[in-house]
Amino acid sequence: MRELGAAVTSGREKAYAYLKETVLTDPGTQGTFLSEQELADRIGVSRTPIREALLQLAAEDLVELVPKRGARVSPLTGREIRELMELRGIVERYAAQELVAGGGAPVAELRSLLERQRGLTGADQAREFIAVDHRFHAALVSAVGNALLDRHYEGLRSRQVRAGVAALFSVQGRQEAVLEEHEAILDALAAGDARAAWAAIDHHLESTLKVLLAG
C-alpha cells in the first residue's frame, strides 16, 4: 500500500509540475479549457493525478473548475498584473537593498544569465528567453538567503513567465528593451548602488506593466 501511495503521489507531482511549468506558462492557454485525457496521454499518467493536480492549481487560483466543463486556465486580469508587478517590486527592491548592504550581490551569475538571454532573440525562443528572465530575478532574490522568501517568490513563477511571454509579443523590440533593463539592474548592483538598483528594478517592472496593460 505504501508503494502504491508513493506512485500516486509521484504521478500527481509530475502532473502538477508539467501543468504549472509548461501549460500554465503558455499565454495561448489563457481562458481555454484543458482536456484531462489529452494531458494524461501527453504526460504519461492516468487521469486521476491530472484531476488532483488541477484541484491543487485551482486552490492557487491558477485554474478555474467549471461544473460539467472542466478546468479553465484563469486569464491574467489587469488587476492581477498590477498586483504581480507590485509584489515583485517589493521583493526585488528588498533583495537589492540587502545584497548591496551585505556586499553579496551575485554579479557573476546575473551576468552569465544576461549573456544567455542575449542569445535567445528569436520569436520561437520567447518562452526560453522569459524562463531565463525569471532565473535572473530569482537569482537576485535567492542570494539573500531567506528560504521562505525564495518559496514565496517562486510561487509567482507561472504568472510571471506567462506575463513575460505575453509582453514580448505585445510590442516590437521588447526583448531588446528587457536586455537593456537587466543591464541597468546588473550595473547598479555591481557598483553597490542600492538607489540605482531600486530605480532600475522599478523602471523594468513599470515598463513591463505598461506593455501588458496596453496590449
Image (cartoon, rainbow, N blue to C red):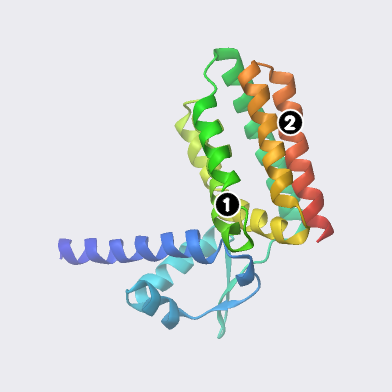
Looking at the rendered image, the disc whose residue lies closer to the viewer, 2 or 1, is 1
Residue behind mark 1:
120
Residue 30 visible in image: yes
Kind of residue sitting beneath label 2:
Ala
Query: Residue 200 shows which numbered tag?
Result: 2
Of residue 100 and residue 69, the one placed in the foreground of this image is 100
**Direction from residue 38 to residue 210 in the image, left or right:** right
Query: Residue 141 shows which numbered tag?
Result: none
Kind of residue sitting beneath label 1:
Leu
Write the residue at 59% across / 20% down. 98
Q: Which image quarter holds the C terminus? A: bottom right
**Would you place residue 159 above or below residue 73 in this image?**
above
Write the residue at 49% across / 60% down. 20
| Element under disc 2 | helix
Write the residue at 41% across / 68% down. 52
Residue 149, position in %: x, y? 52, 34
Residue 169, position in %: x, y? 71, 61
